[in-house]
Image: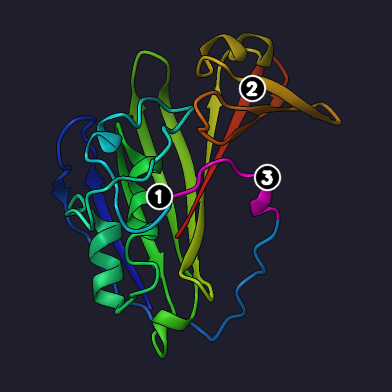
Amino acid sequence: MSQQDQFMSAKRSSPTVEADRQRLVEPKRRRWPRVVGFSLLGLVVAGLGFAAGNYAAIANLVGSATAAQSETANPALPDTPFLEHVKQAGVQACSTIYPVLGQILTTGAKYSVKSLWNDQAADKHAVQAFVGMDYATERYSGPAAGVVFASPTASGCEGTMVRVAPFASPCADIPSILPQGSKITDHLGQVEVYELGGNAGEALLLPTGKSCVVISVASAAK
């Protein structure tokens, strides 16, 4: 099953629907790719509680703020297509992780999202989103693409988000706009890998001529 929506995300308030475009599709049966490499991702969400301020603190395109553990149990999540889609699908195990990762990915952007899930047993399989975004911020103005992936585990749910944004600047200029405390950890060929400050995940800098594609990654688990 899939669901597609267009949405506008605001930095400090619940997003409002700009225009709904919904389409139901019966996909062919598919094998979900095995999730690997999550041990390298720096964002861990403990339990079901999230401080409300974390949503406002998802500060910028490159770094996503850590969703820290909160003593407040199960607060209301922002009303986004990601939340609506897990409700529609009947997803329980990833009903928090999936919308939180979607919110982290899209904060500050106008976006369209298409969610995919198993319509026979949604709560036993992964749920995934393809996201197209348009930004108009001080740090970046232009398009970006993203993926949100969450899968049930024996103890709850694990998920990750990936954002891809083409910057007009060369990669040598990008470290100056990364979150404070970011540090380079690897060189993979011509690709530099940064651990983002504030436990905000990783960023890969992919040089493309005189410009740079920034791939930022963050994960969550409960």
Quadrant of the rendered image containing residue 197: top right
Spot occupied by residue 59 in the image (x, y as percentages of width and height): 35, 26
Residue 98 as seen in the image, left or right of residue 169? left
Q: Quick one: 85 or 152, which is closer to the camera?
A: 152
Disc on res. 93: none
Q: Nearer the viewer, mark 3 or mark 1?
A: 3
Q: Amino acid at mark 3?
A: Leu
In this view, 35 is above or below 10: below
Q: Amino acid at mark 1?
A: Leu
* Main SS, magenta residues: loop
Q: Indicate which disc, 1 or 2, sits on the residue closer to the N terminus.
A: 1
Spot occupied by residue 87 in the image (x, y as percentages of width and height): 24, 72
Q: Residue furthest right?
A: 189
Q: Residue at x 40, y 80 (%)?
A: 123
Q: Amino acid at mark 2?
A: Cys
Q: Residue at x 40, y 42 (%)?
A: 105
Q: Indicate which disc, 2 or 3, sits on the residue closer to the N terminus.
A: 3
Tell me how far mark 3 sits from mark 1, CA to CA.
17 Å
| Residue annotated with mark 2 | 212
Disc 3 crowd rating (10 Å Cα; few below 14, some 14-19, many 20+) is few
Residue 80 as seen in the image, left or right of residue 125? left
In this view, 123 is above or below 141: below
Q: Nearer the viewer, mark 1 or mark 2?
A: 1
Disc 1 crowd rating (10 Å Cα; few below 14, some 14-19, many 20+) is many
Q: Which residues are magenta?
A: 37-45
| Residue annotated with mark 1 | 101
Asked which secondary structure carries label 2, the reply is: strand
In which quadrant of the rendered image does the N terminus lie?
bottom left
Is residue 57 a member of the stretch shown in magenta? no
| Residue annotated with mark 3 | 40
Tell me how far mark 2 sits from mark 3, CA to CA.
22 Å
Q: Indicate which disc, 3 or 1, sits on the residue closer to the N terminus.
A: 3
